[in-house]
Image: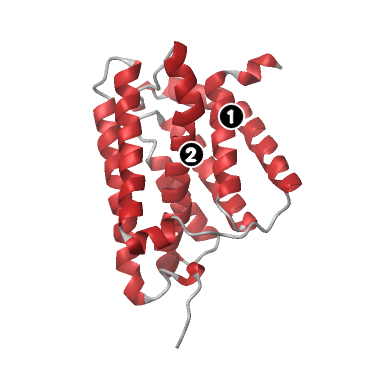
Amino acid sequence: MESRSPDAIGDSKADRAPSLWWFALALFPHVVSQLMRLHQHSAAGWLIWDYAGRIAALVILAAIPAARAIAYRREKRRISLLEIGVWIAGLVLLDRLGQWPQRLINATFPATIVGEYPHPTGWLNVFDLVVGLVLVAASEEIIFRRLLRNAARPYLGDGAFAILITSLMFGAYHWWSGVGNILLATIFGILFMAMYRRSGALWPVLLAHYLVDLVAFAGIWRWF
């Protein structure tokens, strides 16, 4: 009897359509929450819809056995903790350096900005930094790195072209935040996918994503 490794899931013709369906099902509540967020006038309302969409996506993936086998599979790390630290430091630095051209591009094309991130204060800000950003990193990495990579592999392979296309989709997911942020998200999509391929496990990428966002949203970079 033939055995298949977790990495082989989604490679056969029979698995292609289900893999794409899992990605679409997980992405749907994200898009709905994006649309609902744009109509919120308070940070709390914005965050409630944001969390709801992300949690719904993760629950959907957990509830379907075939999707769960892909989205939540265990993977063995292939790189050292030191290399993970170097990746994270480089990504955080790149994000800081990318803020100026991002703002310049958004200022040049202001009509592309249809919404802005909220600015919660007090306990809500602490909760968002500690819990909310973890939810952001987990949902986006599972969906756009692990799930989308698996769904696209039978059609695009697993090389540079696949990285580019999946990263463009990750950038397009940020459609509401301005063309500057879309471009920056696309670049980070490429780097996150490259890190994922090299590390062999998703958790180092998830950690990097979280820390990049934490430094940005908490203003930690201003302390140095």
Q: Quadrant of the C terminus?
A: top right
Whether residue 140 is situated above or below residue 75 in the rendered picture:
above
Q: Residues within 10 Å of mark 1 (few under 14, many from 20)?
A: some
Where residue 6 is drawn, which disc sits there?
none
Toward which corner of the image does residue 118 lie, by quadrant? top left
Residue 21 position in % (x across, y down): 29, 59
The local secondary structure at tag 2 comes to: helix
Residue 71 position in % (x across, y down): 42, 56
Q: Quadrant of the N terminus?
A: bottom left
Whether residue 62 is situated above or below residue 213 in the rendered picture:
below
Horizontally, residue 107 falls left or right of residue 77, namely left
Whether residue 32 is situated above or below residue 43 in the rendered picture:
below
The residue wearing badge 2 is 137
The reply to whether dot 1 and dot 2 touch (C-beta < 8 Å) is: no
Of mark 1 and mark 2, the one earlier in the sequence is 1
> Label 1 sits on what residue type?
Gly
Residue 20 position in % (x across, y down): 33, 60
212 or 187, which lies in front? 212
Residue at 44 percent of width and 30 percent of height: 132
Horizontally, residue 38 falls left or right of residue 194, namely left
Residue at 35 percent of width and 76 percent of height: 13
Toward which corner of the image does residue 56 lie, by quadrant? top left
- Does the rendering let one see residue 207? yes
Q: Residues within 10 Å of mark 2 (few under 14, many from 20)?
A: many
Q: From this viewpoint, which residue is outermost toward the right?
A: 82
The residue wearing badge 1 is 98
> Label 2 sits on what residue type?
Ala
- Does the rendering let one see residue 114? no
187 or 47, which lies in front? 47
